[in-house]
Image: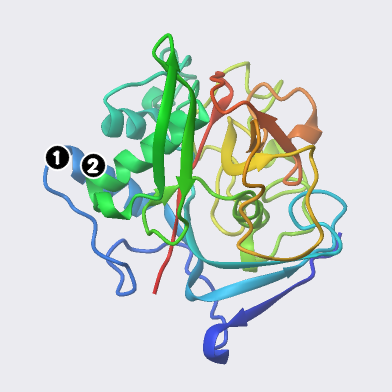
Amino acid sequence: MKKLFTLAVILCICLLPLTAQVKLYKENSTRPYKMQNTAERRIVTWLEDAEIEVIPAGQFAVIEGSFKDGAFIKGRDVALHGYTMCKYEVTQELYQLVTGTNPSFFKVDAPNGEDKMKRPVENVSWYDAIIFCNQLTCLVMDERDCVYTISNIKKENGQIRSADVQIDLKKPGFRLPTEAEWEFAARGGTRGGWEYEYSGAKRIQDVAFWQPSSGGVTHEVGKKEANVLGMYDMSGNVSEWCNDWWVDGKIPKGSADDPIGPEKGDRKIIRGGAYDSAAQKYCYVTYRGHLMPFYQYNYQGFRICRSVLE
């Protein structure tokens, strides 16, 4: 497969090569992250190591679709604006620091030499993931930066069953990636690697824990090879929630500017393979799955991103 994409930049400034690692206190940030106590320092330290600038502020990429499957199908042109994404899936350690809880199934008996708290958090619903994003934003940024406005919450057995959620991508807080943002980063962004079926390699064993290589358990994040952009585990370990609703598996053709999917639906998009993915196709960067937003499974986690505003 041949990747076809062009880059466009506001005011005709050429798009410079992306920096694989960004600092949290760069000049174009909306505000520096807060570090008022030990927990917040640990959180910011994790973010400082993990956050990668996929598309810099003030710039955007236009991807001319040329693929049969995935977000960038033939006949669809997608424009994506500045955003960062964490190179790791959210870990149990980070989730517990932010929320005070760890719902994961795989809490003990990590494989030899691995840190059990650095395994990805799993057994989290889509609602759990967006609440985490808001809580993280409040801790290290400000409440007014939160992307999600959540109302009309209905619970069963202590878990959110449904809620009304408004998503404002113009806010600079932490959030789940859109499906297009997820796939763009998984493929390698502007750095190449779009010919690979998996995120960063032709061979699944180089970049992913899947069945049977996983041994039936999750693993510490970052143990396999990263893709060219620096992203880990986007073809395995745990599948990841995205912002978008799934509607009959259809992606519309035509031009799309920062697409966020349908306004309504009953299932949310999931992307990426997991430790229990028995078929390699589930680990492809183009594979699209879906789950009810209240489902919690031990193969389902997430990673976070945020819009980079000028």
Q: Element at badge 2?
A: helix
The residue at the point 53 percent across, 90 percent down is 11
Instruction: State the count of labels.
Output: 2
- The residue located at (71%, 20%) in the rendering is 212
Give the quadrant of the C terminus. bottom left
Q: Residue furthest top?
A: 157
Disc 1 packing (10 Å; few <14; some 14–19; many ≥20):
few
The spot of residue 211 in percent (x, y) is: 71, 22
Residue with the mark numbered 1? 38
Please tell me how crowded label 2 is: few (under 14), some (14-19), or many (20+) other residues with Cα within 10 Å: some
Q: Secondary structure at mark 1?
A: helix
- Which part of the image, by quadrant, shows the N terminus? bottom right
Q: Is residue 54 above or below residue 236?
A: below
Q: Residue at x 67, y 21 (%)?
A: 276
Q: Identity of the amino acid at label 1?
A: Thr
Instruction: Write down the residue under mark 2.
Output: 42
Residue 118: quarter of image: top left
The x and y percentages for residue 282 are: 75, 33
Q: How is the structure coloured here?
A: rainbow
Q: Quadrant of residue 119?
A: top left
The answer to the question of whether label 1 and label 2 lie on touching residues, with beta carbons closer than 8 A, is yes
Q: Is any part of residue 120 visible from this angle?
A: no
Q: Which mark is residue 74?
A: none
Q: Quadrant of residue 101?
A: top left
Q: Amino acid at mark 2?
A: Arg
Residue 51 placement (x, y as % from top left): 41, 54
Q: Residue at the location (39% across, 26% down)?
A: 115
Q: Nearer the viewer, residue 191 or 152?
A: 152
Query: Farthest left residue?
Result: 36
Q: Residue furthest front?
A: 152
Residue 125 vs 62, above or below: the answer is: above
